[in-house]
C-alpha cells in the first residue's frame, strides 16, 4: 500500500473550559457505569495467578478472570432495547464512508434508500460513534481530518479537525482518551476524546496497525498488524507495548479484532489465512484457528452475543460462529457474489449491515434466515459503515464496539 501524501488543515478553536469540564464529568460517569456493568457480568481477581503473561510481558493487575460471566458476558448491556438515553430518540440510520468518493452516504434502513450524501476529507475509512454516544466521527485517512456528524440531524457538525493519518478511531474504556490509529505512521495517538488535542503518541512495532479491542477492565488493548502477520498488546496505564506475537509464517494479514463474551479470549480475522485466530488475552498466545472463508475481515456480535458474524470479503459470504466456543453454525452467501466488509447489527438484532467494498453497494442480511434482503447502491469504495444508534452505554470506537 503506497502511503498517501500528508495534507494540512486548520486547527479547531479550543473549547471553553466550562464545556471541557462538563465533558470530563460525563466521561467519568459513563466509565463508572461500565465498571458496574462489568462487575455484574465478570468476577475479577486481584492477581495474575499461575497463568501470567509470558516473559517480556507485564503482569497487568486485575485482569485475571476467576469466574465465568453471566449471559452475554461483556456484552450483557448491548442486547435489544438497551439504548442509552443519549440515543433512544434517534432515527435509525446507516452511515457509509465511501473511501474512493470522499463522501458519506446516509441510508434509511426502513426504506433501504440513501437519503443524504455529503463530501468529507480524502479517503474516509470508518464512521465511529464517540465514547459518550453524542457524536459520530468520520476518519479521513488521506485528508488527515476527523469530521463530526450530529446523529440528531445526520449532517456534518462544524469544521473538520486536523489529525495525523486517522485510519481508525477507538476510545479507552475509562473515557479519558481517544486512540487515533495512524496506520501508515505505525503509531497510536492518544487524544482528548472531545477536542482531539494530542495527549501522547506511541510508536508501535506493528506495520499496518489497524484494528483493536480492549480487556474488560480496560487495562490493556490487543491490536492487529496487517502487514506484519502479528498482534501487539498495549498496557493502557503505562501506554506502552508489553508483548508482540507472530500469528503465522509472515504471509497473513490480520484485520478486525473482537473480545469474546468471556472477557478472556480475543478473535482476530485474517484475510489471507481465511479464518479467525483465537488468542488468550492473558498469556497472549494464539490457541486455535477457525477457518471461515476467503478474505475473513470483519467480526460482529449478534445482539444477544450468542453468535458472531465474520464477513468473508473475497468470496462474498458471512460465517456464523458461536461467540463463546467458535463452533461453526451457518454460512450465508451473496447471490452473484460481493465483497462484504465492515458494518454492524441493527438495534433489534434482525439485520446485519455490511459495506460492499469493491462493488459500491451496501448489503443487509436477515439474521434469522441468512438471506440477503437489501443491496443498496452507494459511492465508490464503501468501507467502515456505522449502524446508529446501537444498544449499549458507551462506545469503544471502530464502527460501534459497544459495551
Image: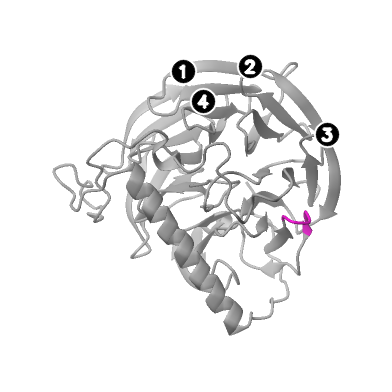
Q: Which residue is rendered at x = 53% and y = 22% of the image?
A: 320
* Disc 1 packing (10 Å; few <14; some 14–19; many ≥20): some
Secondary structure mostly taken by the magenta-highlighted segment of the chain:
loop
Which numbered disc, 4 or 2, marks the residue that appears first in the sequence?
A: 4
Residue 135: give its label.
Answer: none
Secondary structure category for the residue under label 2: loop
Percent position (x, y) of residue 187? 50, 60
- Provide the residue span drawn in magenta: 151-155
Which numbered disc, 4 or 3, marks the residue that appears first in the sequence?
A: 3
Separation of disc 1 and disc 3 at Cα?
33 Å
User: So how many labels did they put on this image?
Assistant: 4
Separation of disc 2 and disc 3 at Cα?
20 Å
Separation of disc 4 and disc 3 at Cα?
34 Å
Please give the residue where the numbered disc 1 appears in the rendered image.
Answer: 328
Percent position (x, y) of residue 218? 38, 55
Whether residue 248 is visible here, answered yes or no, is: no
Above or below, comparing residue 126 to residue 314 in the picture: below
Tag 4 near tag 2, CB within 8 Å:
no
Which numbered disc, 2 or 3, marks the residue that appears first in the sequence?
A: 3
Please give the residue where the numbered disc 3 appears in the rendered image.
Answer: 111
Residue 274: give its label.
Answer: 4
Percent position (x, y) of residue 131? 55, 58
View extreme (left): residue: 50
Tag 1 near tag 2, CB within 8 Å:
no
Please give the residue where the numbered disc 2 appears in the rendered image.
Answer: 369
Frontmost of labels 4 and 3 is 3
Which numbered disc, 1 or 4, marks the residue that appears first in the sequence?
A: 4
Separation of disc 1 and disc 4 at Cα?
14 Å
Q: Does 152 appear in magenta?
A: yes
Frontmost of labels 1 and 4 is 1
Which numbered disc, 1 or 3, marks the residue that appears first in the sequence?
A: 3
Amino acid at each position: 500500500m503506497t502511503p498517501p501524501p500528508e495534507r494540512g488543515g486548520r486547527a479547531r478553536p479550543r473549547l471553553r473550559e466550562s464545556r471541557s469540564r462538563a465533558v470530563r464529568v460525563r466521561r467519568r460517569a459513563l466509565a463508572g457505569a461500565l465498571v458496574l456493568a462489568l462487575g455484574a457480568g465478570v468476577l475479577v481477581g486481584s492477581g495474575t495467578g499461575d497463568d501470567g503473561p509470558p516473559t517480556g510481558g507485564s503482569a497487568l493487575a486485575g485482569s485475571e478472570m476467576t469466574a465465568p460471566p453471566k449471559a452475554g458476558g461483556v456484552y450483557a448491556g448491548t442486547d435489544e432495547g438497551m439504548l442509552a438515553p443519549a440515543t433512544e430518540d434517534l432515527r435509525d440510520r446507516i452511515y457509509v464512508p465511501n473511501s474512493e468518493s470522499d463522501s458519506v452516504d446516509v441510508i434509511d434502513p426502513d426504506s433501504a434508500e440513501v437519503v443524504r450524501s455529503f463530501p468529507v476529507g480524502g479517503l474516509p475509512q470508518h464512521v465511529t460513534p464517540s465514547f459518550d454516544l453524542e457524536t459520530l466521527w468520520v476518519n479521513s485517512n488521506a485528508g488527515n481530518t476527523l469530521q463530526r456528524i450530529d446523529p440528531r440531524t445526520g449532517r456534518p457538525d462544524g469544521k473538520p479537525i486536523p489529525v495525523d493519518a486517522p485510519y481508525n478511531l477507538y476510545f479507552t474504556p475509562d473515557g479519558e482518551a481517544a486512540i487515533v490509529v495512524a496506520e501508515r505512521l505505525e503509531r497510536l495517538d492518544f487524544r482528548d476524546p472531545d477536542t482531539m488535542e494530542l495527549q501522547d503518541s506511541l510508536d508501535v512495532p506493528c506495520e499496518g496497525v489497524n484494528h483493536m479491542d480492549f480487556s474488560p477492565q480496560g487495562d490493556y488493548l490487543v491490536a492487529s498488524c496487517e502487514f506484519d502477520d502479528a498482534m501487539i498488546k498495549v498496557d493502557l496505564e503505562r501506554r506502552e507495548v508489553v508483548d508482540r506475537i507472530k500469528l503465522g509464517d509472515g504471509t497473513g494479514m490480520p484485520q478486525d479484532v473482537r473480545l469474546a463474551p468471556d472477557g478472556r479470549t480475543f478473535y482476530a480475522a485474517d484475510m489471507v489465512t481465511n479464518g479467525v485466530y483465537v488468542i488468550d488475552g492473558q498469556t497472549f498466545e494464539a490457541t486455535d484457528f477457525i477457518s471461515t472463508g476467503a478474505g475473513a475481515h470483519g467480526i460482529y456480535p449478534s445482539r444477544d452475543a450468542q453468535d458472531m458474524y465474520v464477513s468473508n470479503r473475497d468470496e462474498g459470504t458471512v460465517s456464523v460462529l458461536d461467540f463463546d466456543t467458535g463452533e461453526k453454525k451457518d454460512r450465508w452467501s451473496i447471490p452473484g457474489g460481493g465483497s462484504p466488509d465492515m458494518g454492524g447489527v441493527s438495534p433489534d438484532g434482525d439485520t446485519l449491515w455490511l459495506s460492499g467494498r469493491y462493488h459500491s453497494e451496501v448489503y443487509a442480511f436477515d439474521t434469522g434466515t441468512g438471506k440477503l434482503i437489501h443491496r443498496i447502491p452507494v459511492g465508490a469504495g464503501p468501507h467502515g459503515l456505522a449502524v446508529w444508534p446501537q444498544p449499549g452505554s458507551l462506545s469503544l470506537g471502530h464502527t460501534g464496539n459497544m459495551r
